[in-house]
Image (spheres, grey):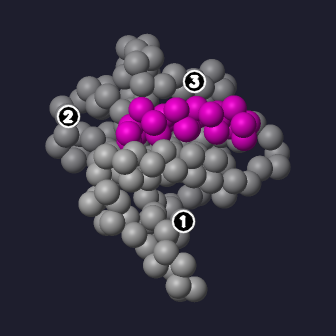
């Protein structure tokens, strides 16, 4: 499923014209650091194009291979409509980062998440992260757009 998420993220990156600077897929949440390449953009559309195709794929998989788990994703909406929800309701913690120091600190924070949780000893050891790319140029998960990151933070 992590691979599916990265595929969805990569497709959305092309469709919605944003650069991916950092990511970490944790067991129950995701951290992304993205940079829109256009002045006008919609973060809700970007997130929709990342999350929606992934959710559909996950639901199809569970419907076929794990219908019992699919019931755990059941969500009855206030209007009575029932659907299956992979992502929790509401937004995440979105904010605009403009200062190079804040961007650097956020990049470090994102990459250190698996270490703080005790999942690995070093950020670059977490397979589902961009940390290995920055530490040793390892493109095994998904290659971030480091060129624009370095141009922005110096």
- Label 1 environment density (alpha carbons within 10 Å; few <14, some 14–19, many ≥20): few
Q: In the displayed structure, does residue 137 sit left or right of residue 14?
A: left
Circles 2 and 3 in contact, beta carbons < 8 Å: no
- Quarter of the figure with the C terminus: top right
- Label 3 environment density (alpha carbons within 10 Å; few <14, some 14–19, many ≥20): some
Sequence-wise first label, 2 or 3? 2
Asked if 97 appears above or below 134 in the picture, the reply is: below
Quick check: is 13 in the magenta stretch?
yes
Sequence-wise first label, 2 or 1? 1
Asked if 6 appears above or below 79 in the picture, the reply is: above
> Which residue does the numbered mark 3 point to in the structure image?
146
> Which residue does the numbered mark 2 point to in the structure image?
120
Task: Choose mark 2 or mark 1, whichever is in front.
Answer: 1
Query: Horizontal and vertical percent for residue 82?
Result: 49, 75
Depth check, front residue: 85 or 121? 85
Circles 3 and 1 in contact, beta carbons < 8 Å: no
Quick check: is 33 in the magenta stretch?
no
3D distance between C-alphas at marks 2 and 1: 28 Å
Q: Residue furthest front?
A: 64
Sequence-wise first label, 3 or 1? 1
**Could you say whether the residue bearing mark 3 is in a helix, strand or loop?**
helix
**At x 42% / y 32%, what residue is drawn?**
3
The quadrant in which residue 145 appears is top right
> Which residue does the numbered mark 1 point to in the structure image?
91
Depth check, front residue: 69 or 147? 69
Q: In the displayed structure, does residue 143 sit left or right of residue 48?
A: left
Circles 2 and 1 in contact, beta carbons < 8 Å: no
Instruction: Specify the segment rendered in magenta.
Output: 1-25
Task: Tell me, yes or no, if residue 93 can be seen here.
Answer: yes
The quadrant in which residue 130 appears is top left
3D distance between C-alphas at marks 3 and 1: 26 Å
Depth check, front residue: 46 or 111? 46
């Amino acid at each position: 499923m992590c691979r599916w998420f990265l595929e969805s993220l990569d497709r959305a990156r092309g469709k919605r014209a944003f650069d991916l600077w950092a990511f970490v897929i944790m067991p129950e949440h995701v951290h992304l650091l993205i940079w829109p390449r256009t002045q006008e953009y919609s973060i809700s559309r970007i997130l929709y194009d990342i999350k929606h195709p992934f959710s559909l794929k996950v639901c199809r998989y569970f419907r076929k291979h794990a219908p019992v788990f699919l019931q755990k994703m059941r969500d009855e909406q206030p209007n009575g409509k029932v659907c299956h929800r992979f992502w929790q309701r509401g937004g995440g913690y979105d904010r605009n980062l403009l200062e190079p120091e804040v961007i650097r600190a956020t990049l470090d924070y994102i990459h250190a998440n698996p270490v703080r949780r005790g999942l690995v000893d070093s950020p670059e050891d977490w397979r589902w992260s961009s940390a290995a790319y920055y530490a040793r140029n390892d493109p095994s998960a998904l290659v971030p757009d480091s060129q624009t990151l370095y141009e922005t933070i110096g």
